[in-house]
């Protein structure tokens, strides 16, 4: 299986749906320059993720580490399915 990286797919290369597409590498210096003078880093961002969806969790676990490299303060909150559905995603589905 491919090592977990935020710039790559989580699929095993033997998976029929795997495609080795070009991905965008993390560029901390470029990102920091773009964020200079903005609110980024001054506020905490929380990513909510349904705990039972393993690929979602796997992806979400990478974001705080990468975001920290560019000065962002990102936290991960794993929630149960009912909490997930009663949150913002439910509002998007019903509106």
Image (spheres, helix red, strand yellow):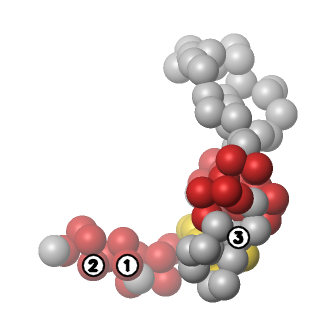
Residue 70, given in percent of the width and then of the height, sits at: 75, 60
Q: Which residue shows up at 60% across the image and 20% down it?
A: 22
> To which quarter of the image does residue 74 belong?
bottom right
Q: Is residue 80 above or below residue 61?
A: below
Nearer to us: label 3 or label 2? 3
Pick the front one: 1 or 63 = 63
Could you tell whether 93 is left or right of 60 in the image? Answer: left
Pick the front one: 35 or 54 = 35
> To which quarter of the image does residue 77 belong?
bottom right
From the image, tell me which residue sits under label 1: 88
Nearer to us: label 1 or label 3? 3
Tell me which label, 1 or 3, sits earlier in the chain: 3
Q: Which residue shows up at 83% across the image and 34% down it?
A: 3
Pick the front one: 77 or 84 = 77
Label number found at residue 91: 2
Could you tell whether 81 is left or right of 1 in the image? Answer: left
From the image, tell me which residue sits under label 3: 72
Q: Is residue 12 above or below residue 74?
A: above
Asked whether residue 77 is in view, the answer is no
Dots 1, 3 in contact, CB < 8 A: no
Residue 63, given in percent of the width and then of the height, sits at: 69, 58
Q: Which residue shows up at 66% across the image and 84% down it?
A: 42
Tell me which label, 3 or 2, sits earlier in the chain: 3
Mark 3 vs mark 2, CA separation in Å = 27 Å
Q: Is residue 25 above or below residue 53?
A: above
- Neighbour tally class for label 2: few under 14, some 14-19, many 20 plus, Cα within 10 Å: few
> To which quarter of the image does residue 37 belong?
bottom right
């Amino acid at each position: 299986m491919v090592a977990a990286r935020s710039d790559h797919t989580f699929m095993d290369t033997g998976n029929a749906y795997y495609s080795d597409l070009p991905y965008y590498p993390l560029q901390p210096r470029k990102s920091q320059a773009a964020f200079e003078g903005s609110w980024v880093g001054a506020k905490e961002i929380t990513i909510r993720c349904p705990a039972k969806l393993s690929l979602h969790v796997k992806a979400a676990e990478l974001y705080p580490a990468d975001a920290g490299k560019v000065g962002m303060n990102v936290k991960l909150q794993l929630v149960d399915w009912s909490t997930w559905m009663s949150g913002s995603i439910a509002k998007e589905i019903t509106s």
